[in-house]
Amino acid sequence: MFSKGFEFDKITGTADIKQGVIITNNLKIEGSSAIVTMAGQMDLLNETQNLRVRIVPTVGNSVALISALVATR
């Protein structure tokens, strides 16, 4: 699903930055292969993170092809 990086089309959400810590509850990254949502915090100074990440693969042409192959068997 992800090879040389995650190619995305859109990023939405809000975040607060206080003393080098980014806090978000609604970051959403939409790409052709998946939709990724994140909530939690990232400490830029200490390079730590405490995030809840959800990755939902998008349904593409490969699913239609697999469905067609299954239907013909």
Image (tube, rainbow, N blue to C red):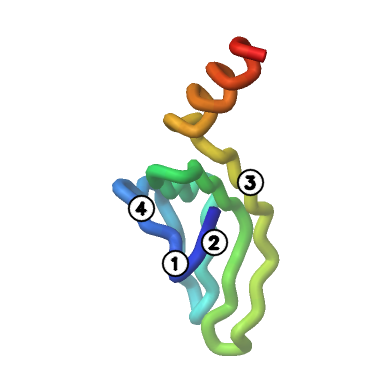
> Which of the marked residues, 2 or 3, is nearer the chain's N terminus?
2
> Which of the marked residues, 3 or 4, is nearer the chain's N terminus?
4
| Residue type, mark 1 in image | Gly
Q: Position of residue 38 (x, y in %)?
A: 57, 51
Dot 1 corresponds to which residue? 5
Q: Are marks 2 and 3 in contact (CB under 8 Å)?
A: no
Dot 3 corresponds to which residue? 54
| Residue type, mark 4 in image | Phe
Provide the secondary structure element on which disc 2 rests. Answer: strand
> Which of the marked residues, 2 or 4, is nearer the chain's N terminus?
4
Marks 3, 4: nearer the viewer = 4
| Residue type, mark 2 in image | Ile
Provide the secondary structure element on which disc 1 rests. Answer: loop
Q: Residue at x 60, y 12 (%)?
A: 72
Q: Residues within 10 Å of mark 3 (few under 14, many from 20)?
A: few
Q: How many marks?
A: 4
Provide the secondary structure element on which disc 4 rests. Answer: strand
Q: Are marks 3 and 4 in contact (CB under 8 Å)?
A: no
Q: Residue at x 61, y 11 (%)?
A: 71
Is residue 25 left or right of 28 when viewed as pictured?
A: right
Q: Is residue 36 above or below residue 17?
A: above
Which quarter shows the C terminus? top right
Dot 2 corresponds to which residue? 23
Q: Work out how far the residue at label 2 is from the one at label 4, CA to CA, in angstroms.
A: 21 Å
Q: Residues within 10 Å of mark 2 (few under 14, many from 20)?
A: many
Q: Residue at x 45, y 32 (%)?
A: 60
Provide the secondary structure element on which disc 3 rests. Answer: strand
